[in-house]
Amino acid sequence: MLKIVKFGGTSLASAEQFAKVKEIILADKARRYVVVSAPGKRFSDDIKVTDLLLTCFRLRSEEESFDEPFEKIRQRFREIIADLGLDLSLEADFDEFKKRIVRGASQAYIASRGEYFNAKIMAAYLGFPFIEAAEGIIFDEDGRLQEEQTNEKLGALMKKHPRAVIPGFYGATENGDVRIFSRGGSDITGSLAARAVKADVYENWTDVSGFLMADPRIVEKPRAIQVVTYRELRELSYMGASVLHEDAIFPVRREGIPINIRNTNAPEDDGTMIVEKADTSEGIVTGISGKKGLGAIYIEKSMMNNELGFGRRVLSVLEDRKISFEHLPSGIDTLTVVADRTALVGHENEIIHALQKAVSPDRIHLVEDLCLIAVVGRGMAGSPGVAARLFTALAEEKINIRMIDQGSSELNIIVALNEADYEKGIRAIYRAFAS
Ligand code: ADP
Ligand code: ASP
Ligand code: MG
C-alpha cells in the first residue's frame, strides 16, 4: 500500500499544525510521500504566506520597499522552526532570497518560496529527504505543464527515496526557470506525484472533513459527501467549490487512483472518496456550488436557428476580443453568452457594435450582475421532477431565475440568478435536496 499525502495551507499554518501532520503521517506506514503547501491562515484575518510573497513582488515592481511583508514571512518561518525545536536555520537562505528579489526575481519564483521553505522545514521535522520540485515538475516556456515529462522525471526522483517531502505549487522549465500553477495548485503537485509512483490512494488533507454538499461559508453545517465521482467533482470545483483544484483530477484519474479528502483537525473522520464510478445511493443531488461575478450578452433574432453560421459569427466576435464564455444557452430565436463580468465591463459598446455588424440581431443587450449555481448529481439522470423541485425551492424564496442550462449528460442543472440572490439561492436549493 502506497499513499501520497498532501497538506494544505491551514494544515501547516503553525508548529501546532505541523505536529498534527506528523502524527497523521506516522500513524500509517503507507503515507510515504508528503506534498506541502505554504503556511496558510492561522486565524480568519491572518495573511497566507503566498499572499505576502505576492505583495513583495508587487512592491518590488512598483519600486517600493518590500521589507514589511518580507520580514513577516521570515518571522513566520522562524517561529515554526523555533516552536518545533528544530536544529535548522533558514536565515542565510532568507538573506539570499531577499537579494534575488532585489535583483529582479520573477513573480513565479517569489511566489514559490512559501512551498519551498515549508517543505525544507517539514523534511527536517520528519527526517525525510527533500525532493526539489523544480527538477521533477516540468513546464514549457509558456508555463504549460509537460505532463509526460513530469511523470517520468518526478517518478525517477521519487523512486530514489522510499520516503520524501515535495514542495507543492511549482516546477520549472528545462532551463530551470521556476513556474507555478494557478492558486491552490499544490493539489495538482500531489496528484502528479500520485500518478508518478502509481500510488494506491491520494490523500488530500485540509481543514474540512471532506467535500461538503455546499460551501460551509454559506450553508451552516452542510452534510459531508461520502463518495463523489471525478466527473461530479469536476463540475462542482469548476463552479467554485474550492476544496480541490479543478485540474488536480486528471493525473490520478488516468491511473484510476482515488482521492480521499481528509481533515487534519479531525483525522478520525473518513472524509470524501473521489472515484471513477459510484452507485447513486448518495441521493439525487451530490453537491451544490456556484460562482459570482458573471455577465451575459442576450442576442435575439427571429429564426436564428435557420441561419447558417450564426453561432460561429457570434463566437468569432468574442474570440477576437479574447472573451471566453462560460455557458451558451440557446433557443429558437435567442442565444445567450454567459461570461466573466470583467471581460465585458468597459467594453459594452464595442461588443454590441461588433455583434450588430456580425449577425444583425433584432435585439441585443448586456447584463452584468449574474451569478451561476450548479446542482450536480449522478443520481439526477432519469430521475423525474428534479428541475421542478429546484424551481419550486427558488420560487418559494421569490428568487427570479434568469437562465437555465442543463448539461447533456444530465449530471447537472445550472441556473443563473441575480447576483444579490446568490447566498439565498444556494441555501434554498440545499434545503430542497439535503433531506
Ligand atoms: P487547503 O488550504 O487545505 O488547500 P482550501 O482552502 O483550498 O484548503 O480548501 C478548503 C476550504 O474550501 C474549506 O475550508 C471551505 O471553506 C472551502 N469550501 C468551499 N466549498 C466547499 C465544499 N463544498 N465543501 C467543503 N469545503 C468547501
Ligand atoms: N500556496 C499556494 C496558494 O496559496 C498553493 C496552494 O496552497 O495550493 O495558492
Ligand atoms: Mg487548496
Image: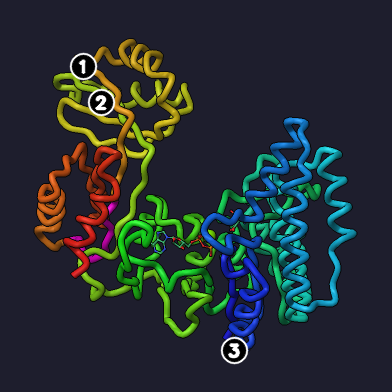
Q: Nearer the viewer, residue 232 or 37?
A: 37
Point out residue 47 in the picture as x, y percentages from the top left corner: 60, 54
Point out residue 286 in the picture as x, y percentages from the top left corner: 28, 65
Nearer the N terminus, badge 2 or badge 3? 3
Question: Which residue corresponds to mark 2?
Answer: 298
Q: Nearer the viewer, residue 151 or 328?
A: 328
Nearer the N terminus, badge 1 or badge 2? 2
Q: How many C-alpha atoms fall within 10 Å of the one at disc 2: few (<14), some, or many (≥20)?
A: some
Point out residue 13 in the picture as x, y percentages from the top left corner: 62, 66
> Given contact means CB atoms under 8 Å apart, are the residues at marks 1 and 2 in contact?
yes
Q: How many C-alpha atoms fall within 10 Å of the one at disc 1: few (<14), some, or many (≥20)?
A: few
Which amino acid, by three-letter code, is at mark 1?
Arg
Q: How many C-alpha atoms fall within 10 Å of the one at disc 3: few (<14), some, or many (≥20)?
A: few
The CB of the residue at mark 1 lies under 8 Å from ligand 1: no
User: Would residue 73 be visible to someone looking at this image?
Assistant: yes
Q: Residue at x 67, y 49 (%)?
A: 52
Query: Under tag 3, what secondary structure?
Result: loop
Query: Under tag 1, what secondary structure?
Result: strand
Q: Is residue 141 above or below residue 62?
A: below
Q: Calculate the distance from the C-alpha at mark 3 to the C-alpha at mark 1.
A: 64 Å
* Segment tinted magenta in the rendering: 374-381
Instruction: Give residue 196's quadrant in the image.
Output: bottom right
Question: Which residue corresponds to mark 3?
Answer: 27
Image quarter for ligand 2: bottom right
Q: Is residue 67 left or right of residue 397?
A: right
Q: Residue at x 66, y 40 (%)?
A: 142
> Given contact means CB atoms under 8 Å apart, are the residues at marks 2 and 3 in contact?
no
Question: Which residue corresponds to mark 1?
Answer: 363
The CB of the residue at mark 2 lies under 8 Å from ligand 1: no
Point out residue 184 in the picture as x, y percentages from the top left corner: 55, 55
Q: How many marks?
A: 3
